[in-house]
Image (cartoon, rainbow, N blue to C red):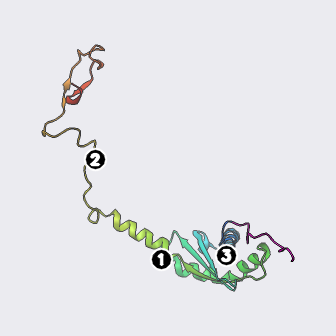
Amino acid sequence: MSKPRRPASSTTHKYPRTARLNESLREVIAEELTKIDDERLDLVTITAIDVDSEMNRAIVFFDSLLGVDGDAGILEALGQHRIRLQSSIGRQVRAKKTPILSFKPDDVIRSAEHIQEILAKSATLPERPPTPDDELDDTDGTDDEIETNPELDDATGHPAGAKIHRHDI
């Protein structure tokens, strides 16, 4: 009987090949965008890449400070620079193929921002319950603070001029 060529463990990497490839492509494209002199791409961030399993196509997700209003110009600029980005990937990433890039705005980030805006409106939030500090033994409805007594000293355990609360007495 012959021994297997490799040990039983299939890979020494902690996450799958496509995840590593997605991250490598994101880094290369983001770095290349900084080198491109196109002011439409100044405020663009590459948020994620999704490469298919055969590495034929890759969807590049982006976001921008311009929001939805700037998407048309950004998509046009990225389309014009697609060949340059693909050739940069071909030079920098060790892979058999270079995927064809397509670009889409990252709707996940925009959806999260929209949800946060909705939650920030006071009408959508329920009334907060009182905190434990608000309920400091206030069962009789009176104010716990009595008065400032400048004649207290160390014998009582309170410094002179300290405010005394009923729960301290």
| Residue at numbered disc 1 | 68
Answer with left or right where residue 132 lies relative to residue 55.
left
Whichever of labels 3 and 2 marks the residue nearer the N terminus, that label is 3
Amino acid type, mark 3: Thr
Residues tagged 3 and 1 counted as in contact (Cβ below 8 A): no
Q: Amino acid at mark 1?
A: Val
Q: Identify the residue at image location x=24%, y=43%.
A: 134
Q: Give the quadrant of residue 84.
A: bottom right
Placement of 53 over or under 23, stated as above or below: below
Q: Which residues are magenta?
A: 1-13
Write down the residue under mark 3: 18
Secondary structure mainly formed by the magenta segment = loop
Q: Is residue 116 shown in magenta? A: no
Q: Residues within 10 Å of mark 1 (few under 14, many from 20)?
A: few
Left/right placement of residue 116 relative to residue 45 reads left
| Percent x, y of residue 23 | 66, 70
The residue shown at (16%, 35%) is 143
Q: CA distance from mark 3 to mark 2?
A: 48 Å
Residue position marked by numbered label 2 in the rendering: 131
Nearest to the eye among marks 1 and 2: give it. Answer: 2
| Alpha carbons under labels 1 and 2: distance apart | 40 Å
User: Which type of secondary structure does the marked residue at label 2 adopt?
Assistant: loop
For the C terminus, the image quarter is top left
